[in-house]
Amino acid sequence: MTRSTAPSPSNAIPLIQAAAADALLQADPHEVAALLRSSGAVLLRGFPSSMAEFQQFTESLCTGFHQPGTRRPVNDPESDGRTSLVPRKNSNLFAHSEGMYRPFPPPPEVCFFNCVQSPSAAGGETFLVDGVRFLKKLPATLHRRFEQQGILYQALWESSRWQTEFQVESLQALDEMLRDHPESSYHMVGEEMAVRCRVPAIQTSLGGLPAFANGLLAHLPAIPHPRWRDKEVYSKASNRVFFGNGDAIADEVINLLIDIQDEIAVDQAWQANDLLILDNRRIMHGRRMTAGDSDRQIRSRFGQLRKEFRQPGVQD
């Protein structure tokens, strides 16, 4: 029989621990959904699963699975094409919510991360940042500006990236889709697409709480913070982030956001068979570097919570 543990100093998020003979499909999706609504995250530990069992369990909670443009489907005959591997690049990655840099198709509501092989070198933790706590730490003027204006993301994507992100195969199909989504626009730069998308910075969690949950810190062209400037942190020179009205977001604001991230981040060390499930509209996630090359292998899936698990009046 599974055993549930509430958050504690030694266990920062709710934990559902498997008994010796428990399989993943014996875990109760109603219990998991309730913990997602109340805490934003839940860790299932000690449940071994095949690819098929992992996918079947995620489908008991979610539908409408989303393939991020930054990931590729895992090469496994049991995969349905919507399961991917977390990129193995050994670098720090700042906190972000998956897919929140574009408004349509809708970003996933739930993230699943399943550890097949834990890091073989020190480090490699996934860290979690609660957007509800984050929002409370924002200065009032900055809170209001993000709430009123959102974030404008600018990126340069190759054809395979924009086709995956927008789930279209041609520019004609993209033009037809964007006629109903004026918050997104693009122009071609040679063979690449320059994309601009205006997206809310503050989401409503599955539990009905406002949360600072977005992709801003993982979409920087460079890292301005003196504590991080000389460390290996993901950035991309062609990326840009602005307030929703087009004004630049000053380095001082970026550094404040990084300070809040670092203050409230909670590290989650990986064990084989761990399944970490997140409310993507509340909990941002990031990655710590390992001390050296590592064979860490984590499967990921991203979907929309089934209607029967929703809190009445929230995200209907």
Image (cartoon, rainbow, N blue to C red):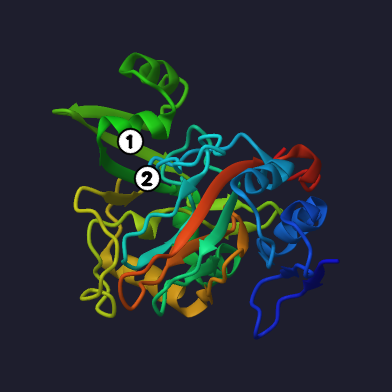
The residue located at (64%, 49%) in the rendering is: 54
Image quarter of the N terminus: bottom right
Which residue is more in the foreground, 247 or 33?
33
Which residue is more in the foreground, 89 or 281?
89
Q: Quadrant of residue 260?
A: bottom left
Mark 2 highlights which residue?
70
Residue 307 in sight here: yes
The residue located at (57%, 38%) in the rendering is: 78
Image quarter of the C terminus: top right
| In the rendered image, the vertical position of residue 289 relative to residue 211, given as above or below | below
Query: Which residue type does callout 2 highlight?
Result: Thr
Q: Which mark is residue 87?
A: none
> Could you tell me if the residues under marks 1 and 2 are in contact, i.e. CB atoms within 8 Å?
yes
Q: Quadrant of residue 223?
A: bottom left
Mark 1 highlights which residue?
161
Query: Which residue type does callout 1 highlight?
Result: Arg
Q: Quadrant of residue 294?
A: bottom left
| x and y percentages locating residue 89 in the rendered image | 31, 60
| x and y percentages locating residue 169 in the rendered image | 37, 20
In the image, taking residue 179 as reference, residue 238 lies left or right, namely left
